[in-house]
Image (tube, rainbow, N blue to C red):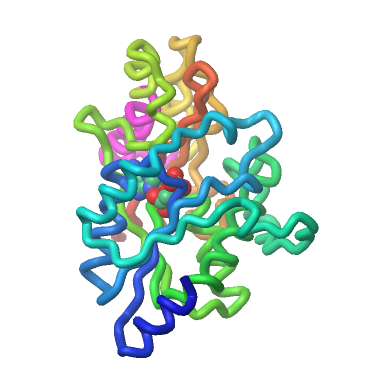
Amino acid sequence: MRSASRAARQKGQRLGFVPTMGALHEGHLSLVRTASAASGVVAASIFVNPTQFGPNEDLAKYPRSFERDCEMLEREGVDFLFAPSVEEMYPADAVTWATVEELSGKLDGRSRPGHFRGVSTVVAKLFHIVEPDAAFFGQKDAAQVAIIRRMVRDLNLPVEIVVCPIVREPDGLAMSSRNAYLDPEQRKQALLLHRSLMRVQQMAEAGERDVAKLSAAGRETFAKEHSVRLDYFEVVNPDTLDPVSDITQGALVAVAAYVGTTRLIDNLLLKPIPT
Ligand code: AMP
């Protein structure tokens, strides 16, 4: 991978990189298309990273569709696919981590201890292997975006981070590889995440500034649906992931909920309010 990347860059081509865990959908492809538009050469990776899954999480059953993924990437004109084995990525006695302190314990990090340490470590490793000029991430994983940006800044990694908008199903559900776990009833219930965010957006657009009221309204969306268990509904600063008391400077409204045993996330960026 590294020699292919270096050969391309030596020809003066800009290398765009899209890291994924496979089971590709239109959300992933939107990153690939943005990368293609901005780069002469595009590399993608497919790696279901074990270190970002907790002991009781879905590593073993995470959807895998390698052949189909390859076809999709080929159709999009991706030049290189890096799909290493776990053994290749992690020597058995590996003990070194790239940890983004503080941020990694917020939002999803609170309910998924160790998750972001696994994410930042694998992304750092992938950046060292692929050596891209730019890497493309989805706004869907808003906390991940904050953590990767911070790591790149703190460790002087020479990679531009480009964040692409959330791609949704026609009814608003954010696309996710984990949506494949949902049965038809749960698929309907999963819409609550988007609905809660829409409710907050409408209130903010109608002039509501009180974060407590906005969060309460978001949370209330989940109150009647007992088969959906809210993990968090928070209004935070998109860079620090700390709660904000005021949305005038803009804010990230982030939600996570369990639909059955499937954990889904979604979010909304509120723009700064012109004074
Ligand atoms: P994953 O395969 O879930 O690790 O996701 C790989 C990349 O695709 C991450 O940067 C995600 O944020 C991004 N992604 C996943 N779903 C979406 C979506 N619905 N819209 C935009 N980007 C997405």
How many dots with numbers?
A: 0
Where is residue 56 drawn, in percent x and y?
68, 29
Which quadrant of the figure has residue 150?
A: bottom right
Asked if residue 208 is positioned above or below residue 74 in the image, the reply reads above
Decide which of 163, 224 is in the foreground and name it. 163
**In this picture, residue 122 sits left or right of residue 215:** right
Residue found 26% across the figure and 53% down from its top: 30
Where is residue 168 drawn, in percent x and y?
27, 38
Decide which of 94, 220 is in the foreground and name it. 94
- Residue 245 seen by the camera: no
Where is residue 31 drawn, in percent x and y?
31, 56
Decide which of 235, 157 is in the foreground and name it. 157
Q: Is residue 193 part of the magenta span, yes or no?
A: yes
Decide which of 219, 118 is in the foreground and name it. 118
The C terminus - image quarter: bottom left
Asked if residue 38 is positioned above or below residue 136 in the image, the reply reads below
Q: Is residue 249 part of the magenta span, yes or no?
A: no
Residue found 26% across the figure and 32% down from its top: 172
Magenta residue span: 192-210
Residue found 43% across the figure and 74% down from its top: 132
Where is residue 169 drawn, in percent x and y?
24, 33
**In this picture, residue 26 sits left or right of residue 52:** left
Residue found 63% across the figure and 55% down from its top: 103
Asked if residue 10 is positioned above or below residue 245 in the image, the reply reads below
Asked if residue 225 is positioned above or below residue 92 in the image, the reply reads above
- Residue 254 seen by the camera: yes
Majority SS type along the magenta span: helix
